[in-house]
Image (tube, rainbow, N blue to C red):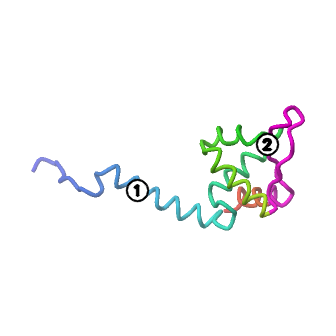
Amino acid sequence: MSGARASDPINDDLGWMLGVVFRAYVRAADHAVGDLPGGPRGYQVLTSADREPARNQGAIAEELGIDRTVLTYLIDDLEQGGLVVRRPDPADRRSRLVTLTETGRAAARHRRTRT
């Protein structure tokens, strides 16, 4: 043969390889943030809410690409866990701003700096 290698159906299949990478990511993410309400998505909400000025649920949902209804349940769980609070938006009483509690800020910081 003139140096041509035989095709490897597993290692040459991008879809299969992406599946391997995705499963490894899910395991790693679960290990890093699985104890938070909502797991990796809960961590994303914490990270998104850890900004100034505080933002409302709609802005967080849009930024993260999470359906508003799903986000409401995630925030409910994070709020029950003492990690976030909802406060009325002074500029729009119909809107709620999501902010981290000190516990939530410490939890987000701990996971960002964890190796």
Which element carries disc 2, helix, strand or loop?
Answer: loop
At x 79% / y 59%, what residue is drawn? 83
> Looking at numbered disc 2 in the image, what kind of residue is underneath it?
Arg
- Residue 83 vs residue 23, the one in the foreground: 83
In the figure, residue 31 lies in which quadrant? bottom right
- According to the picture, the residue beneath numbered tag 1 turns out to be 19
Examine the residues drawn in magenta and state their main secondary structure: strand
- According to the picture, the residue beneath numbered tag 2 turns out to be 51
Image quarter in which the C terminus is found: bottom right
State which region is magenta: 82-106
Q: Is residue 28 left or right of residue 75?
A: left
**Outermost residue toward the top in this view:** 91
Tell whether position 89 is magenta. yes
* Percent coordinates x, y for residue 8 in the rendering: 23, 56
In the figure, residue 63 lies in which quadrant? top right
Residues packed near mark 1 inside 10 Å, few (<14), some (14 to 19) or many (20 plus):
few
The residues tagged by marks 2 and 1 sit, at their Cα atoms, a distance apart of: 33 Å
Q: Is residue 34 above or below residue 14?
A: below
At x 63% / y 65%, what residue is drawn? 34
- Residue 104 vs residue 69, the one in the foreground: 69
> Looking at numbered disc 1 in the image, what kind of residue is underneath it?
Gly
Sooner in the amino-acid sequence: mark 2 or mark 1: 1
**Outermost residue toward the front in this view:** 94
Residues packed near mark 2 inside 10 Å, few (<14), some (14 to 19) or many (20 plus):
few
At x 70% / y 39%, what residue is drawn? 58
Tell whether position 45 is magenta. no
* Percent coordinates x, y for residue 13 in the rendering: 30, 51
* Percent coordinates x, y for residue 24 in the rendering: 48, 61
- Residue 60 vs residue 109, the one in the foreground: 60
Which element carries disc 1, helix, strand or loop?
Answer: helix
Query: Mark 2–mark 1 contact, CB under 8 Å?
Result: no
